[in-house]
Amino acid sequence: MAKEFYIVSDLHFGGDGALQQCDYTDEFVAFLRDLAAKGGDIELVIAGDTFGFWELTTVEGVAKFDVIVADHRAIFDQLRETGKKIKITVMVGNHDYDLACDPAFKTKLAEYNLDLDTSISVKRELLGRTIWIEHGQQADSFNASPEYGNPFAMPVGYFITRTVVSGASRFSDYGRGNWLKDIRSVGTHNIPDWILSNYFYREMGWAIRAVFTIFLLLLAVTALGLIGEFLRRAGIIDFNFLLNNPVIRSLGFVGNILYVLITINMLILFFMLVVSVPGFIVYRDIRKTLRRFQVTWSEISALDDQTNEPYLRRAREVFAENPDAAVYLFGHTHDAFLVEEAGRVIINTGTWLKILNRVSVRFGYMPAVYYPWFHLDCFHIYAEQSCIVIRHLETAKTPARELGLLQRLVTIGKGSRDRRPIPETTEIDVATPAAE
């Protein structure tokens, strides 16, 4: 057994249309070359979702692998070379669930020196303690395999990916800026908001966007003016601070234009308030109807519930049932982190895909902006004297400049991503028993 382990996950090679693009080819090839140069008793474990088989609808069976290799030749050539020097193990995730259903994949992967392990859990040992590795999909009810190994037992997530994600990629070239190719970089529950954001900032005609921008920027001020007008007409006060503002009147022609814009905004806002009343009634009726069919709103929102609690609970179950387990690693949610609990460590291995971080605007009520980031995470685990050492390695990558001027202006000073810090080095002293 290897003495050092490098763990990555969620590479997501392949897919229809623009999903074939890999943004981190150079970085991953360099990473593989570095491992090959080290050589020795090293094992690289790719903990699931290596391939985007669910997103590839043009072919079936093992032909999917051949298509992906053809689209990512540089990576697979380097995998073959690195696999001559170290062991490379590929686990099964939900997006490449096909690997668990057809034994022919094992032969295909072996041609590139990739050892396919179809076990739900992969265990490795250091200093008499277990390193427990899973992809994590079994803790996610919408992506868990109901009958693992059965190619016809597919979870809800499969059908969503095939229709929404793959479908979007086929139309990506028709958009302004090819933004649909990044649909895998947002959570399912964020997709409607992300589409609205890209429609507003990229696809909407510039004249319409200009009008809407003015309206949305002035919306908060207009709301106060509308309240003032209601109070004036109700006879409570005899002055509308916005419509009768002497400062605006003193601006002359510019003030007249601003006055017209504020008046139009107030009329639109009043209409929206009137329409919202029957809209709210219909909304309540829809919820009541769903409850009759035993469907709750929380179950709908749980479709992409990527909170960490189900995965932390799974890790604790593993620790409780396996006292020798010192580290539990999983991927799946694309949210890298490391937490220590009672002398043990729980790790999410993150993703090498682009990550789109939702940033609310600084002014007005305009759609949020999705900032691109890369966090190319790897966890290196090895023994040193009586300690299991875990090193967090991150390959630096700066995303291409994708955001327009308006997107940058309305989020000025808010573009940085607040990421939970991951310690560079974490040690588990195996001489000290873990707390129960």
Image: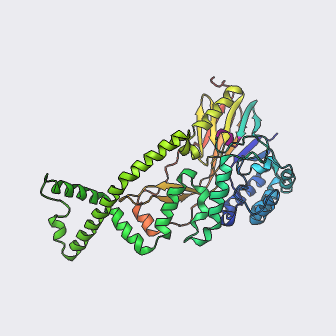
Residue projecting furthest to the bottom:
253
Residue 305 appears in the figure: no
Q: Nearer the viewer, residue 311 or 89?
A: 311
On screen, residue 262 above or below 113: below
On screen, residue 156 above or below 428: below
Please state if 229 lies on the left or on the right of 117 as rendered: left
Q: Position of residue 262 (x, y in %)?
A: 26, 66
Q: Position of residue 237 (x, y in %)?
A: 13, 54
- Name the residue rendered at 16%, 57% in the picture: 233
Please state if 208 lies on the left or on the right of 46 as rendered: left
Q: How many marks?
A: 0
Question: Could you say which quadrant of the image residue 337 lies in?
Answer: top right
Residue 83 appears in the figure: yes
Q: Position of residue 198 (x, y in %)?
A: 50, 64
Is residue 137 rendered magenta in the image? Answer: yes
- Name the residue rendered at 46%, 55% in the picture: 359
Is residue 211 rendered magenta in the image? Answer: no
On screen, residue 332 above or below 33: above
* Region of the chain picked out in magenta, as a range: 134-140
Q: Nearer the viewer, residue 263 or 242?
A: 263
- Name the residue rendered at 59%, 72% in the picture: 174
Q: Position of residue 193 (x, y in %)?
A: 50, 56
On screen, residue 132 above or below 38: above
Colour scheme of the rendered structure: rainbow
Please state if 428 lies on the left or on the right of 368 as rendered: right
| Quadrant occupied by the N terminus | top right
| Quadrant occupied by the C terminus | top right
